[in-house]
Image: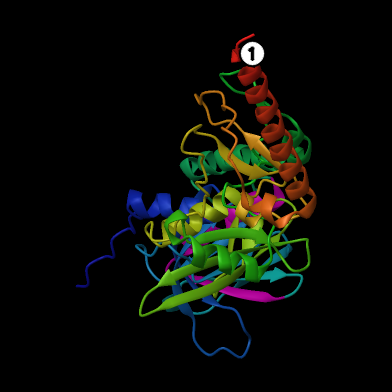
Amino acid sequence: MAKPEKTPVPAPRQIFQARQRITALPLYFEGFLSVRRARNQQDFEQYWTELRGTTLFFYSDKKTPTYLEKLELTNLTSVVNVYPDEKYGAQFILMLRNEEVELKVEDYDSGEEWKGFIFTVTQLSVPVCISLLPGQLIKLHDVLEKEKKRRTAMEQSPSASLSTEKTNKGDYVNKMNTMPECFYAVSRQKAIEMLETNPSWGNLILRPGSDNKNYSVTIRQVIDGPCIKHYRVVNMGKGYTVELARPVMLLSLHDVIDYFVNQTQGSLKPFVTHTYDNKSGMRLVSTSGLPLEHAPREMHPAIVPHPGAKPLRSPMPETETAPLQENPVARYMYETLCKELKERAKRQEADRQSANQPL
């Protein structure tokens, strides 16, 4: 007699947290699903599947932090039941506006539960035409309230992003609109030069995209030799998508940077400048936020005091500087002043000698 299959246990906590960071969506339901996305596809492919928000994320197994594919359910129009022989278990088709996806589970009850959760998050109501146990219905009502709150928060996010949060110092900061420290308004070539010139400052730069609407991440890694790569970050309005082999959606640009750092276990580090005056402890930056060595020449530098720094003392004048030698006007003024000082010294010496002569 064959042993009954064990109920799938949730993914380990560490994997759950990693998936939470990548997807940035609440987990409502999970389990094994067999999927067939194309009509001409012969066989089903089994995935460990998570329903997060209104999206199905498909993983190769329970311990893989990064999903293989995902399916957005907001365009769901209907669910069509398929009734094959009992040995195939429950089977149904998700009718989306642009495609049809066939799903299969091992037993009827699991199929009803999956349909219940999918209907609840897409229609924002608990279905009454599905046979579920009281405990399952309680879970659906709980998910319904969470999804309603999430939708409300998303709708209010544009106005919420304009609101500010008060810090301990009484200053107001806009966390949603603040840019990461490693953002620089530079071109691709300039970003490469910055990473190659100062590798100790980091190896990841966030910069504007070529279309000035989206962003790009430039990284520099040394494996067998220096390697430069660029990744496109698309602004989706309510989040950002990193265009990788398996695209990743994130809520903010800070999350984008954290994703690269976490996925490489810290081998990628944000490029943050450390240009400080040794005497004053002050960081020199341009009005654009770029350090002086990366600022365009026509920009006037602004001096931003480092916290706890002492006031900057005026430097002692030097006898003669390189700019003074190169500038003919400055050189003329300098030579004229020296001549006047010498003549004055001669007159004073002559006055002292005449005063010392006997009457």
Q: In the image, 249: left or right of 298? A: left
Q: Quadrant of residue 343?
A: top right
Mark 1 residue element: helix
Q: Residue at image x 72%, y 58%?
A: 236
Q: Which residues are magenta?
A: 99-124
Residue 210 seen in render? yes
Q: Quadrant of residue 80?
A: bottom right
- Above-or-below relation of 304 to 333: above
| Quadrant position of the N terminus in the picture | bottom left
What x and y, as percent, mark residue 216? 64, 64
- Residue 216, magenta (yes or no): no
What residue lies at 46% left-to-right and 41% top-to-bottom? 135
Locate residue 348 relative to residue 1 in the image: left or right. Answer: right
Coordinates of residue 291 in the picture (x, y in percent): 61, 49
Circle 1 sits on which residue? 355
Could you tell whether 27 is left or right of 341 in the image?
left
Residue 90 at least partly seen: no
The answer to whether 244 is drawn above or below residue 115 in the figure is below
The residue positioned farthest toward the left in the image shown: 1
In the foreground, 234 or 182:
182
Q: Where does the image place residue 2, in percent across and percent down from the top left?
A: 22, 72
Q: Nearer the viewer, residue 327 or 17?
A: 327
**Residue 115 within the magenta-colored segment of the rendering:** yes
> Label 1: how many residues lie within 10 Å, few (<14), some (14-19) or many (20+)?
few
The type of residue carrying mark 1 is: Ala
